[in-house]
Amino acid sequence: MTTDPTKPANDATRHEERAPASEAPPMTASLMARLFVVPAILVSVLVVALMTVVILFGWSGIGERVTAVKLIDRIAGATGDKNQGALFPENKDVWLAAQELAERLKNRDREMKPDEIELAVQRLGAICSELARQENLTEAARRKSVFVMLALGRMGSGSGVAPLIAALSAKDAQLRMAALRGLVELRDLPETQSAMPAVITAMDDASPEVRLMACAAAGQIAVRGDAGAVRALTDKLHEDRETRWNAALALARLGSLAAKDELQTMLDRGYWEQARVVYEAESATTGDSTIAPSVAPTTRVERPFSETQISTIMLAAIDAAVELGDAELMNDVARLRSDASPIVRDRAIKAVRRAQDSADE
């Protein structure tokens, strides 16, 4: 990848593409992870590609809703029953249970009794640790792992931090990304600060996807002004374009102006209209996803940024500029009050108004 911010570089973005199908082959889960990540909704892309299956575990055959605890039983293999077993093989049944558990735990207090939480965290932590030690995971096991780590984070317990930190050493890069996602879910807990050394180490991971997501995670987990996180993120400003974006947004959240130049570029619509998205998309494959996947052929894709992508990036940059309150950055934001995009104009107008109100107080 090129590191020149004035030239096209590799990228993939969070939003659905509008380019013709002939120009842009479907992105894989691995490529989907290499997205521009807005910190406020950090790394949700980890599970987007897996969320296409309709949830089927909400009700049993006789209409009784399966509890979260029973879903954990199923994931752990503690019960022998298989919901919808006639339709799904056992391994798919298990990762679908993990998917539903992660989704349900968005409302943890409605799904679990207070006295059930710590035991559930221990069980999920043990599953997480077992999966993280495995090598050559099947696709079904990988999906199960992603949702288990997400569910562990959504349990909201400090006891879940240690197994997620340990999972940052998993052999599989997607599991390391999932561990970062789980830690971000726990970002408001004081115990999660103990993960920062491992998150900073992940910024130098062998996988570019993990490095990118570690940058975004650091912006969520580290406390404002964390000197170690700021130093590590500043070093990432010399890497590929996607990493620079995420490092810049993370630095702004931590109160550092180190990425001011990068943020100014991100606030420039002209730059995005000239830039190109270039990536290698895996060709469509067929076969049993329960076996370890082979290396798939790729197709080079090059196209302009879509308006949705440009707006998403600019909105994130506006929020980062407001976070910092720098006069030059706010002047750049003020110019966007006449931007071509209505949502960018609206965000810029509100940002300038907030800045003026703060100055008047």
Image (cartoon, grey):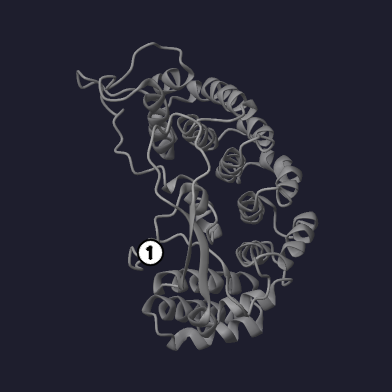
Which residue extends farthest left? 62
Q: Image quadrant of residue 80?
A: top left
**Residue at x 64%, y 53% (from the top left corner):** 208
Check the image and report above or below for 112 versus 243: above
Total labels: the figure holds 1
SS of the residue at dot 1?
loop
Query: Which image quadrant: the N terminus?
Result: bottom right
Q: Amino acid at mark 1?
A: Glu
Query: Which image quadrant: the C terminus?
Result: bottom right
Q: Is residue 145 left or right of residue 258?
A: left
Q: Position of residue 314 (x, y in %)?
A: 50, 74
**Residue at x 41%, y 61% (from the top left corner):** 15
Q: Position of residue 95 (x, y in %)?
A: 42, 29
Q: Image quadrant of residue 87?
A: top left
Q: Position of residue 66 (x, y in %)?
A: 32, 22
As rendered, which of 259 and 224 lies closer to the eye?
A: 259
Density class for disc 1 (Cα within 10 Å; few <14, some 14-19, many ≥20) is some
Q: Image quadrant of residue 285?
A: top left
Check the image and report above or below for 286 versus 44: above
Check the image and report above or below for 11 versus 75: below
Which residue extends farthest front? 297
Residue receiving disc 1: 17
Q: Is residue 7 left or right of residue 290?
A: right
Q: Is residue 290 left or right of residue 30?
A: left
Q: Position of residue 211 (x, y in %)?
A: 66, 52
